[in-house]
């Protein structure tokens, strides 16, 4: 089926990303009401604050009606197959969005869906977050081409999507991850090919952050990895973003975190609550990013 989906940042070209960001920043009145009288299904297999609220409000702003459903109510492959859920919901809704444990569920949905599927976070990626992150960095740093972004911590779903979006923006990318938790060589290659100005991976938070214009991190234990908590706390002990990490970044560097955050675990309170932090703006931008993505998938042009 010839339908545009948004499972990963790489479903967009650099030009598409620019379009999404333009739509995200446009006055709502310019977008029309592409979802007027239409439904959008929002299925969550994991908890959420930002993603649920930003998506629901973005749907409302485009004239539509969001319907939230918990994963256990739908029961993917338990109550009925992923394919049956998708085909049925596609008859009620103009878009289906899902937060899932397994990325493969989203791929199966996209295969049979007659309406766009949006990834609201899987174990592999979090592309809606990346749109908000790039939007925030553009607002704070201006043109991102050749600017340096640092990721400190786990090369997880949020990192993967952020780095892909930053590569499309032509940024220098520096990863600082403990051994065993970084990007694989094939992924580093893939990032270079997307258009990154450069890609480096170090097993040091300080080296990764050195000279960076934006320093990002995320939790050390993602949803679904709770059984690994004790080991991860040891393995990530030297990857907390604190004042000493921010001190080696650019003087005007900003700190970013997708949230929820754990103070004194992956970031100190001093940094996340300090002057360099942009986490609240970043979270608020999730709604504008969601609206931009929905408008793009609905084919809105301005
Ligand atoms: N950043 C993010 O996706 O937050 P939620 O898990 O609260 O949606
Ligand atoms: N990496 C985190 C992001 C939460 C928004 C997780 O997957 O739990």
Image (cartoon, grey):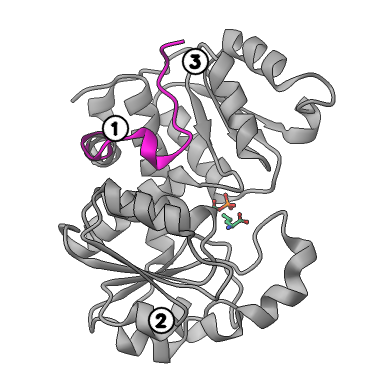
The answer to whether the residues at label 3 and label 2 have Cβ atoms under 8 Å apart is no
Q: Sequence-wise, which precedes: disc 3 or disc 1?
A: 1
Q: Residues within 10 Å of mark 2 (few under 14, many from 20)?
A: few
Q: Which residues are magenta?
A: 1-18
Compared with 72, 142 (above or below) is below
- Residue at mark 3: 115
Disc sitting over residue 274 in the figure: 2
- Residue at mark 1: 28
Q: Which residue is rendered at x = 38% and y = 33% of the image? A: 11
Q: Quadrant of residue 162?
A: bottom left
Residue 191 at x, y percent in the picture: 34, 52
Q: Which residue is rendered at x = 44% and y = 43% of the image? A: 128
Measure how far apart labels 3 and 2 are at the Cα level. Answer: 43 Å
Q: Sequence-wise, which precedes: disc 1 or disc 2?
A: 1
Measure how far apart labels 3 and 1 are at the Cα level. Answer: 23 Å
Q: Is mark 3 within 8 Å of ligand 1?
A: no
- Give the structural element (helix, strand or loop) at label 2: loop
Disc sitting over residue 245 in the figure: none
Residue 188 at x, y percent in the picture: 39, 58
- Foreground residue among 16 and 46: 16
Taking the view exactly as shown, the residue that stands out farthest to the right is 78
Left or right for 81, reference 182: right
Compared with 28, 185 (above or below) is below
Compared with 297, 57 (above or below) is below
Front disc: 1 or 2: 2
Residue 32 at x, y percent in the picture: 29, 20
């Amino acid at each position: 089926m010839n339908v545009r989906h948004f499972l990963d940042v790489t479903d967009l070209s650099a030009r598409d990303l620019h379009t999404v960001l333009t739509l995200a920043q446009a006055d709502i009145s310019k977008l029309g009401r592409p979802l007027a009288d239409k439904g959008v299904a929002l299925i969550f297999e994991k908890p959420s604050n930002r993603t649920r609220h930003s998506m629901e409000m973005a749907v409302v702003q485009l004239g539509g009606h969001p319907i939230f459903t918990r994963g256990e109510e739908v029961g993917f492959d338990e109550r009925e197959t992923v394919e049956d859920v998708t085909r049925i919901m596609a008859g009620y809704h103009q878009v289906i969005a899902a937060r899932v444990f397994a990325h493969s569920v989203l791929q199966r949905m996209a295969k049979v869906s007659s309406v766009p599927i949006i990834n609201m976070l899987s174990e592999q990626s979090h592309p809606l977050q990346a749109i908000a992150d790039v939007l925030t960095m553009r607002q704070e740093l201006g043109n991102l081409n050749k600017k340096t972004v640092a990721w400190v911590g786990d090369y997880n779903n949020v990192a993967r999507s952020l780095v892909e979006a930053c590569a499309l923006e032509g940024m220098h990318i520096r990863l600082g991850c403990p051994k065993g938790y970084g990007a694989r060589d094939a992924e580093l290659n893939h990032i270079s090919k997307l258009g990154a100005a450069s890609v480096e991976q170090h097993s040091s938070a300080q080296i990764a952050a050195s000279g960076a214009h934006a320093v990002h991190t995320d939790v050390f234990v993602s949803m679904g990895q709770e059984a690994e908590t004790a080991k991860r706390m040891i393995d990530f002990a030297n990857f907390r973003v604190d004042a000493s990490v921010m001190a080696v970044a650019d003087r005007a560097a900003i700190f970013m975190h997708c949230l929820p955050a754990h103070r004194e675990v992956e970031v100190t309170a001093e940094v996340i609550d300090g002057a360099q932090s942009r986490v609240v703006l970043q979270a608020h931008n999730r709604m504008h990013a969601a609206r931009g993505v929905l408008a793009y998938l609905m084919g809105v042009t301005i």
